[in-house]
Each structure stands twice: as C-alpha cells, then as structure tokens.
Image (spheres, rainbow, N blue to C red):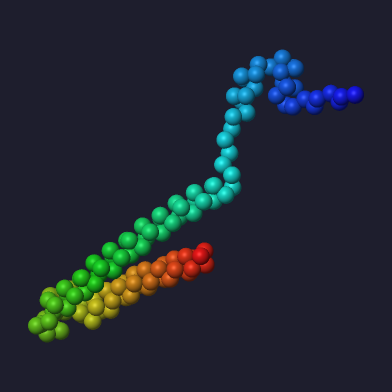
Amino acid sequence: MNAPPIASEETAGLAAGEDADCNRKSRQVTILPTETQSTARTKERYHFDWVWECLAWLLGAATLGALVGIIATARDQSAGSWRHQHANISINAIVAVLSAIVKGTCTLIVAEGMFELSINHSTH
C-alpha cells in the first residue's frame, strides 16, 4: 500500500486555486547568507581603512614638508625678528605642533601596517 504524497506549499496553493506563476513570483526573495553580508561589510571597512591611511600619509608628508620649509626660512633670522614677523608666535611652538602632527600620522600608519601583518600572519 502506497502512502499518499505529502503536499508541498506550492501544490497546496495550486489545490486551493492559486495560479502557479503568481505563487512563484511572490516567493522570489533573495536573502544573502550571513557570511556574504559579513564579507561585504569587511571589504567595505577594509577600503575605508585604506582611505584613512592614505590621508594620514598625505597629511604627514605635507606637515613634514612644512616643517622643513619653516625651519629653512627661519635659519638666518633671530628669534625676536621671527616672532615679530609671525604674529608673536615663536618658532619653537610651531615646530612642536608640526612635529606632533607628524608623529601622530606616522604612528597611525605604522600601527595599521602592524595590524595588517598580524592579520595576514594569523590567516596563513
């Protein structure tokens, strides 16, 4: 004795009088698996991190160039004449601020590079 076939959702809908094409169209919802969504977010974040690293590199290079340029122009001037020409700001203060910016950008770049190396090392 054969058991009757179990009706699926599609055959149950057809038995109730629904059109087969209408029933299929209403079920065509594409949901990405969790792994694919996670991978897509990781790739977007990875590219976003590269943008920050490039901007930090450009800021560091520009600041270092400005630091060298300021020191080169102030080379033959006395501290008093420099202060008088530049809104009563000493060259030591300008050098301190610019060198702090260079140190910060270099720290960011090196830290990101070390992070990438640790990720690459742990995946191999």
Lateral position of residue 99 relative to residue 72, left or right: right
Q: Is residue 62 above or below residue 14?
A: below
In this rendered view, identify the residue nearer to me: 57 or 85.
57
Q: Is residue 67 visible?
A: yes
Q: Give me the residue at 59% from left, 47% from top.
A: 34
Q: Residue furthest top?
A: 17
Q: Nearer the viewer, residue 85 or 40?
A: 40
The quarter of the picture where the N terminus appears is: top right
Q: Position of residue 25 (x, y in %)?
A: 59, 24
Estimate the x, y position of residue 99 in percent, counting from the top left. 28, 76
Residue at the (65%, 22%) spot, across then down = 23
Of the pair 55 and 73, the residue shown nearer to us: 55
The part of the image, by quadrant, that contains residue 61 is bottom left
- Residue displayed at 16% across by 73% down: 69
Q: Residue furthest front?
A: 1
Residue 104 spot, x, y in % from top left: 35, 72
Q: Which image quadrant for residue 79?
A: bottom left
x then y, percent, for residue 74: 13, 79
The front one of 59 and 34 is 34
**Residue shown at 59%/44% (left/top)?**
33
In which quarter of the view is residue 75 placed? bottom left
Q: Is residue 3 left or right of residue 122?
A: right
Q: As drawn, is 36 to the left or to the right of 76?
A: right
Q: How many marks?
A: 0
